[in-house]
Image (cartoon, helix red, strand yellow):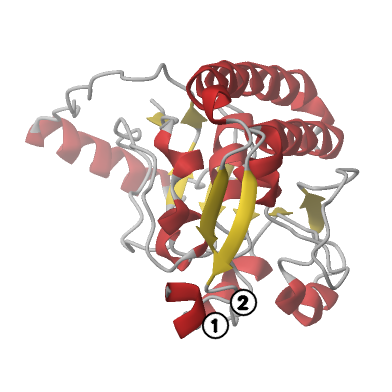
Amino acid sequence: MVNYQAWDPRWEASAAFLCQSRSTSPELKREDELNTKERPSQASPTTVTDSVIGGEGAEQGDRVRCRCFPLALLLLSCALWSCGKDVPAKTDRTILCSFYPVYIATLNVAHDVPGIRVVDMTSPRTGCLHDYQLNPDDMKRIEGAWAFVINGAGMEAFLQEALSNRPDLAVVDANRGVALLHDSSGQENPHVWVSIFGAIQQVQNIGEQLARLDSNHATLYRANASRYAARLDSLRTRMHALLDPFAGTDIITFHEAFPYFAREFHLRIAAVVEREPGSEPSAGELA
């Protein structure tokens, strides 16, 4: 049995989610895990095992649980005790993701890959990672990870020391080879996923790099990446139909997260309010 993460078209357009501490998350549709697999007790970070892509607007499935008779449980307990050996637990490989946007992409790319767990290191409400600081739980998750998917482009500068302690950890850079925009000071803008075209590039990057790391399942990673990219491309077509009539329109944005979005949909950013997360807009910006 698998879990499901649905794509919500509102995800791309939500400024509150993209770079503020509060976000509008995609709708989640999840089925139960196998009864033999223990459900994580923590509400955060978000953990999904053997994730699957489903169609948009799919209805929530009924929860189904296997019912075991007490006698069967008693017999099973006796059988295990009489063997004199512990039953070995299934060993999963964990793909850790730095924050929610790359988690969503990886969740779809790793759909139905045997023995793979996809874990979001940070809460979906964390937003961008500009000022993020690692905590002890983060360090434990990094220590136990098989691969670490990051946004790259300077978004996770805080990881440098932690990753130096795990030279064996495979790091998947979602922005590898992507042409980045720069701000007026020449600094790279890491918010590539805000553009749907950029999100597609990231999905393809993640799929290819995971395929090279896990050659036994390379075909599945690549097929999942292609399927999810096609869904994103369909969303892109619909959004162009809605936004193309507004080409050339001036817009005001919160935070410097929207240059990729504006470029894709031919919009002009006239002003940016709250350039840094948590900063107060000036009187001039509010006027």
Residue at x 60%, y 69% (from the top left corner): 129
> What secondary structure is marked by label 1?
loop
Residue at x 80%, y 51% (from the top left corner): 173
Residue bearing mark 1: 135
Q: Position of residue 206 (x, y in %)?
A: 74, 38
Residue bearing mark 2: 139
Image marks 1 and 2: residues in contact by CB distance under 8 Å: yes
Q: CA distance from mark 1 to mark 2?
A: 7 Å
- Which residue type carries mark 1? Asn
> What secondary structure is marked by label 2?
helix
Looking at the image, the residue that sits furthest to the front is 287
Can residue 64 be seen?
Answer: yes
Give the quadrant of the N terminus. top left
Q: Is residue 191 left or right of residue 77?
A: right
- 1 or 2: mark nearer the eye: 1
Q: Position of residue 5 (x, y in %)?
A: 42, 33
Classify 10 Å Cα crowding around label 1: few (below 14), some (14-19), many (20 and above).
Answer: few
Can residue 94 be seen?
Answer: no
Give the quadrant of the C terminus. bottom left
Residue at x 59%, y 82% (from the top left corner): 133
Looking at the image, the residue that sits furthest to the left is 70
Q: Position of residue 37 (x, y in %)?
A: 38, 42
